[in-house]
Image: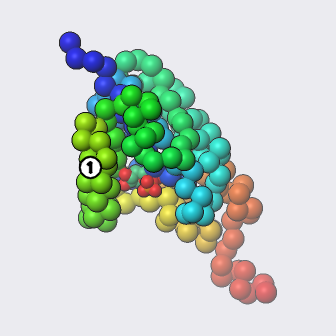
């Protein structure tokens, strides 16, 4: 019998999307214990501050459990990912991989992390075809322009985005009414 496997799924989650949720649900089958690390990443100028991003992920995983039947932890972090992973005693870093776009960045990050600690493996998971193309960045852009983001994010996240942006704008009308 091996030791329980702890995995960390790190990201910015600004905000959590159906793509992230797809990866999270796959990750629960891969590890005994799953910790979602929400990077503060203030430099990226996030739409939501870290506490809100943590809260949104928590809402979505509240009813999920990982391999050991325990709830999934959602923890903010502001330090080096490998230090965060070591402090948690985790053995795996989980990342999602979308078609070609993520490869270069993820490849470099996994390589650097393995030099920092070769005992921690990075495991890549792919979302289903229907969630492959979803990106937080585009969700925000679509929402900003008044488009329907209901297919891309969970309903509670959609509500928060709409609230954050005020009433959805209709660019054509906004121009006409100026
Ligand atoms: P980061 O700033 O670390 O890239 P993100 O929140 O954008 O944080 O993404 C976290 C992880 O989830 C990354 O590995 C990213 O590739 C993955 N991911 C995001 N959206 C999807 C998706 N639609 N399908 C698969 N993986 C995804």
Q: Residue at x 40, y 37 (%)?
A: 85
110 or 68, nearer to the observer: 110
Above or below, comparing residue 52 to residue 141 in the picture? above
Q: Quadrant of the C terminus?
A: bottom right
Q: What colouring style does the render use? A: rainbow
| Residue of label 1 | 115
Name the element at disc 1. helix
Give x and y (percent) for residue 36. 46, 38
- Give above or below for 10 relative to 141: above
Residue lying farthest to the left in this orientation: 1
Res. 127 visible in picture: no
Q: Could you tell me how many numbered marks the image carries?
A: 1
Locate residue 135, reporting x and y percent.
44, 59
Query: Residue shown at 47%/28% (left/top)?
Result: 72
Q: Name the quadrant of the N terminus.
A: top left
Name the residue rendered at 54%, 47% in the picture.
78
Label 1 C-beta lies within 8 Å of the nearest ligand 1 atom: no
Q: Is residue 67 left or right of residue 70?
A: left
Does residue 161 lie above or below 168 as drawn? Answer: above
Q: Residue at x 63, y 59 (%)?
A: 47
Position of 41 compared to 120: left or right? right
- Looking at this rendering, what residue extends furthest in the top direction? 1
Considering depth in this image, is 76 or 157 the residue closer to the camera?
A: 76
Image coordinates for residue 90, horizontal then vertical, percent: 36, 31
Q: Quadrant of residue 101?
A: bottom left
Residue 19 visible in image: yes
The quarter of the picture where residue 142 lies is bottom right
Front residue of 139/122: it is 122
Find the residue positioned furthest to the right. Answer: 178
Badge 1 density bin: few <14, some 14–19, many ≥20, Cα 10 Å: few
């Amino acid at each position: 019998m091996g030791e329980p496997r702890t995995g960390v799924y790190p990201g910015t989650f600004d905000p959590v999307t159906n793509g992230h949720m797809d990866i999270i649900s796959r990750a629960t089958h891969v590890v005994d214990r799953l910790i979602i690390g929400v990077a503060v990443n203030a430099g990226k100028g996030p739409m939501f501050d870290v506490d809100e991003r943590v809260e949104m992920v928590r809402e979505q995983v509240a009813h999920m459990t990982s391999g050991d039947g325990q709830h999934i932890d959602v923890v903010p972090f502001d330090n080096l990912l490998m230090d965060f992973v070591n402090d948690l005693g985790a053995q795996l870093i989980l990342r999602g991989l979308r078609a070609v776009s993520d490869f270069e960045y993820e490849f470099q990050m996994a390589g650097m992390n393995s030099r920092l600690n070769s005992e921690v493996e990075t495991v890549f998971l792919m979302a289903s075809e229907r969630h492959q193309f979803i990106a937080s960045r585009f969700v925000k852009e679509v929402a900003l322009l008044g488009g329907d983001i209901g297919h891309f994010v969970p309903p509670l996240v959609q509500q928060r985005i709409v609230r954050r942006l005020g009433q959805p704008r209709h660019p054509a009308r906004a121009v006409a009414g100026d």
